[in-house]
């Protein structure tokens, strides 16, 4: 077994030798990764002809990179066939942010100062879509995303560039080190001849007519679910090069089976070209669904459910086709409102389905609207006599439809007729506490589905439980977290004597507290992400907790057993509502939608 080490860095005797990797090249890339001297290059370019061992060198390094903090690779994005958006989606997923647009990803990384070692194989083979459009060219990915990433001082990257000349001459606009390096990049050239048995075929060799490989129904329709992976991945790429490309592309983009089973990245790159005619609503549907559909971990049933949910608000014909497939999954969308930007949601007590006949929703302008929970349609505007600058971030609704609002400034406001003055007392109590100690300012508000109890979280990590129906001098309070609370929810027990409180905080923890006892000593969940919304309900299959995370993932907890099921979110979530009949409403700045959960088999 060969030994490759770097002065002052890791000793990687455990790394296995790999055919196609020379000791000199391995030592060079390892020395670069382990180097800590001032002005050390932050970019390592791996050059060479096809089959010369570039990919083997990167794979060799990745296999042993976790052996030392300096050499640990934080993300590996296989960039062949990716355009800028798809590269950002995958990088965001690997870094724990969820699939993000390039602009949002750069914003997150600008704030996040953790070191980032990025491995980018096949940059020279990146690009997708029509050949005469910028997304098809690797230089566009470099200019729009990779260069801004490299300008961040915490970023280092190993980039495979082939013989393309990409990133030649790169230097940071502002040197990250006190002494600017004479050579901002290290270039490792593995040669221009195939190494050993690693000669690679030229691009497109052996493909032929991909659609000719498709199995078809008796009436000639393609069976995309039975197609080989290569056919599904590259059929649209080949159609773009066909002599009659308009007809070939349209045949694929109007085939629901291909939209479900074809390459989401190829479709997204194609739809970015506004010259290509598409069925009504397909572009809007794809903009919403593509970031999640591009995750290769999703099953066909989950892809169908996601695409159906996205199509409900923009492409009804596609939604109708996908409905039978979506109904076979554990969640099925019942309505979608891409036009409804929401910051808060709350069930209105007294309606059918344990208060889920209507939902009270707040938008970013501070307006309140009643929504039909079954359709998502607005039924009434609710006037709120509060300061015009108030922007509700949380809502609690009492049986008489009086409201307690939590604004983006941390202030609580009562609204509506409140003859017992209970809500006014709650608001005054927390307002006075925040004046004495700003760390006690409220930052999260939730309610039990039946509307009788509300829970308030503050910036010190405390949870405060109040009755909204009867006067109460002080709340039932406990310190649950050591960081500001980001979301709260609660459930009254069947005997109405006890309340189960669920809370999450800025440290990524989720905690449970049954108010007749001490809080659980340890979090029930902790992740490197933030909880953005919570909701709970007593369903036909027991109490369920829904937890939305900042990485576009929703966790559904079966509280009595502790079993959890993750499902992807189509929009960034800021508000949740869960009904007794297992209808989950998701709202955020980019729209709202509702799904029906199959709780009978959700945790199978």
Image (spheres, rainbow, N blue to C red):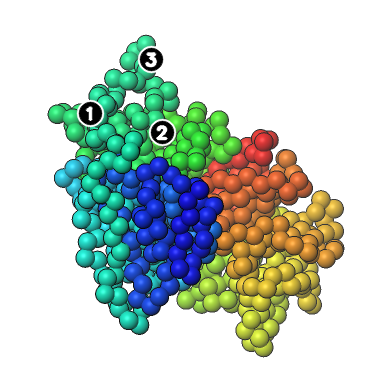
Quarter of the view holding residue 321: top left
Q: CA distance from mark 1 to mark 2?
A: 17 Å
Q: With 540 as the anchor, is 415 left or right in this view? A: left
With 564 as the anchor, is 168 left or right in this view?
Answer: left
Can see residue 253? no
Q: Is residue 228 above or below residue 316?
A: above
Check residue 217 in the rendering and tell me which mark sits there, or answer none. Answer: 3
- Disc 2 is placed on an element classified as helix
Instruction: Give the crowd class for mark 1: few <14, some 14-19, many >=20 residues within 10 Å.
Output: some
Which residue occupies the extreme bottom position in the image?
Answer: 436
Q: Residue at x 20, y 55 (%)?
A: 165
Distance from Cα at disc 3 to Cα at disc 1: 19 Å
Decide which of 289, 227 is in the foreground and name it. Answer: 227
Q: Position of residue 219 (x, y in %)?
A: 34, 13
Q: Residues within 10 Å of mark 3 (few under 14, many from 20)?
A: few
Total numbered labels placed on residues in the image:
3
Residue most toward the top? 218
**x and y, in percent, of residue 542 in the image:** 74, 44
Residue tagged 1: 248
User: Residue 275: percent from the left, percent from the top?
Assistant: 19, 43
Please provide percent x and percent y for residue 524.
71, 57
Residue at which label 2 appears: 260
| Residue shown at the point (29%, 70%) measured from the top left | 184
């Amino acid at each position: 077994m060969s030994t490759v080490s770097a002065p002052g860095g890791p000793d990687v005797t455990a790394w296995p030798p790999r055919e196609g990797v020379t000791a000199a090249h391995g030592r060079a890339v390892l020395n670069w990764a382990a180097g800590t001297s001032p002005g050390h290059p932050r970019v390592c370019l791996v050059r060479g002809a096809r089959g010369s061992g570039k990919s083997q060198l990167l794979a060799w390094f990745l296999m042993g990179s976790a052996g030392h903090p300096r050499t640990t690779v934080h993300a590996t994005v296989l960039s062949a066939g990716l355009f800028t958006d798809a590269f950002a989606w995958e990088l965001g997923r690997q870094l724990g942010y969820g699939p993000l647009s390039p602009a949002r990803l750069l914003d997150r990384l600008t704030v996040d100062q953790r070191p980032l070692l990025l491995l980018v194989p096949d940059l020279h083979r990146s690009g997708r879509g029509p050949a005469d459009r910028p997304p098809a060219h690797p230089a566009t990915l470099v200019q729009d995303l990779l260069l801004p990433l490299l300008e961040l001082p915490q970023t280092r990257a190993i980039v495979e560039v082939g013989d393309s000349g990409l990133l030649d001459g790169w230097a940071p606009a502002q040197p990250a080190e006190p002494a600017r390096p004479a050579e901002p990049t290290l270039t490792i050239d593995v040669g221009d001849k195939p190494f050993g048995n690693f000669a690679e075929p030229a691009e497109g060799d052996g493909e032929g007519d991909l659609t000719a490989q498709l199995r078809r129904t008796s009436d000639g329709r393609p069976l995309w679910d039975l197609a080989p992976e290569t056919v599904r991945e590259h059929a649209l790429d080949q159609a773009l090069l066909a002599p009659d490309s308009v007809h070939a592309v349209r045949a694929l983009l109007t085939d629901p089976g291909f939209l479900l089973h074809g390459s989401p990245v190829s479709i997204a790159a194609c739809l970015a070209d506004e010259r290509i005619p598409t069925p009504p609503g397909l572009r809007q549907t794809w903009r919403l669904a593509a970031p999640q559909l591009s995750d290769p971990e999703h099953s066909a049933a989950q892809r169908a459910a996601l695409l159906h949910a996205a199509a409900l608000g923009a492409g009804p014909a596609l939604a109708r086709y996908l409905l039978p497939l979506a109904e076979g999954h554990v969640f099925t969308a019942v309505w979608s409102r891409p036009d409804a930007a929401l910051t808060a949601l709350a069930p209105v007590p007294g309606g059918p389905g344990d208060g889920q006949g209507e939902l009270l929703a707040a938008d970013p302008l501070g307006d309140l609207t009643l929504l039909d929970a079954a359709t998502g349609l607005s039924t009434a505007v609710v006037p709120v006599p509060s300061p015009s600058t108030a922007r509700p971030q949380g809502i609690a609704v009492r049986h008489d439809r009086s409201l307690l609002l939590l604004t983006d400034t941390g202030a609580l406001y009562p609204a509506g007729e409140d003859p017992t003055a209970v809500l006014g007392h709650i608001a005054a109590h927390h307002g006075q506490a925040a004046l004495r100690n700003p760390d006690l300012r409220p930052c999260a508000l939730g309610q039990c589905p039946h509307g009788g109890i509300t829970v308030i979280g503050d910036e010190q990590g405390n949870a405060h439980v109040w009755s909204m129906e009867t006067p109460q001098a002080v709340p039932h309070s406990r310190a649950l977290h050591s960081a500001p609370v980001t979301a709260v929810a609660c459930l009254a027990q069947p005997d109405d004597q006890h309340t189960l409180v669920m809370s999450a905080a800025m440290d990524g923890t989720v905690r449970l507290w049954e108010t007749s006892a001490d809080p659980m000593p340890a979090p029930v969940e902790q992740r490197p992400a933030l909880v953005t919304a919570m909701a709970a309900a007593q369903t036909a299959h027991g109490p369920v907790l829904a937890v939305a995370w900042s990485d576009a993932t929703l966790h559904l907890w079966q509280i009595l057993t502790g079993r959890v099921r993750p499902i992807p979110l189509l929009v960034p979530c800021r508000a949740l509502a869960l009904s007794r009949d297992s209808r989950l409403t998701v709202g955020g700045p980019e729209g709202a939608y509702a799904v029906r959960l199959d709780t009978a088999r959700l945790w199978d």
